[in-house]
Image: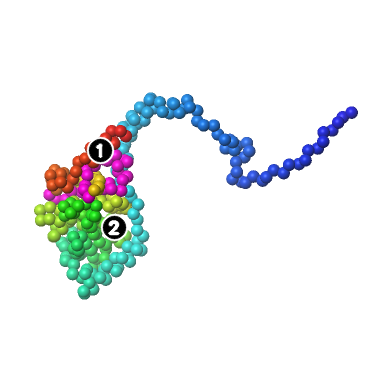
Amino acid sequence: MITLAPSLPSLSLPSLSPLAPSPRCALAFQQPPPLRSLQRVLHSRPLRLLAACAAHILPPPRLELRIDVQQPPQSIEAELEALHGRLHTPGDALYTCTRLPSPFPDLVLHHREADGEHYIYVEDPARARLAGYTVFNRLIEVDRRTDRHVRAPHSKYAPAYQGRGIATAIYELALDGLEGLAGIDTGFCLVSGARQSVGAHALWQALGRRHPLRYVALRHKRMHDLGHAPAPAVREHLDTRMIMLGRGWSLARLRALGLLHMEAEAANGALRRRA
């Protein structure tokens, strides 16, 4: 006689979400930790030596600062339109600007100084508009003695006038000390901001081929020398900036006047050796 097994009650399984892993998928189960032998291989001396050799063979990364500044063209155009109106309004502070010699025959340079900061407005008279402006700001991160010789440039130019080298020519005026910008026999030393746009960084790299350019750390109201190639970890600090030396300036003169200090360069060199 054949005995039939009793029928089992049907089990209702929960429906699986399309994003849930299959019950047979390896991700559905707890994964074992990596093999200790593999960890030992990855941290072995031969592989570390190979990585160190590759670091010397491969080209170094580009020495870029923090590049994350980008303003919409509409806001720039609106600001330039308002400034152009003030430039031709009697009684306004911009109305009393003095003119500077312009390297561009179709553009006029208007200069204004306020509390030690220099503003240069670039006007296109034929189109009755402002092409843009550059301001050389004082740095609150340095002491009074350093403040007399360094400025932080910032520029805004309409898209139609970008790429013509206008901002580069304005920076050159400050570096050369022309017409009341900086001293009689020297120009300003320009220090970059904490952040840059892509265009500003390209401008600095282009000028750096004609003027001495290096890195400094702004700490405790002083400039500390970081050399030409700071370690990547140092380059990411917000107080790490680029400095471009104007006419009449040299590293020796900056150090002799106590404007540039060397202890940061020694610490940066130690970081590079450990990297």
Q: Residue furthest bottom?
A: 90
First to last magenta residue range: 221-248
Residue at (24, 59) in percent of width and height: 134
**Residue depicted at 18% across the width and 54% down the height:** 144
Q: Secondary structure at mark 1?
A: helix
In the displayed structure, 24 sits above or below 238; it is: above
Label 2 sits on residue: 162
Residue picked out by circle 1: 267
Q: Quadrant of the N terminus?
A: top right
Image quarter hosting the C terminus:
top left
| Chain-order first, disc 1 or disc 2 | 2
> Farthest residue toward the right?
1
Q: Can residue 19 be seen from the camera position used here?
A: yes
Whole-percent x, y for residue 130 in the image: 26, 65
Residue 3 placement (x, y as % from top left): 86, 31
Secondary structure under the numbered disc 2 in the rendered image: loop
Q: Crowding near pointer 2: few (<14 within 10 Å), some, many (20+)?
A: some
- Counting from the top left corner in percent of width and height, residue 196 is at 30, 52
Between disc 1 and disc 2, the foreground one is 1
- Residue 5 in the image: above or below residue 143: above
Up-down: is 172 above or below 23? below
- In the image, 259 versus 52, the foreground residue is 259
Task: Report the amino acid beneath label 1.
Answer: Ala
Three-letter code, disc 2: Gln
The answer to whether mark 1 and mark 2 are in CB contact below 8 A is no
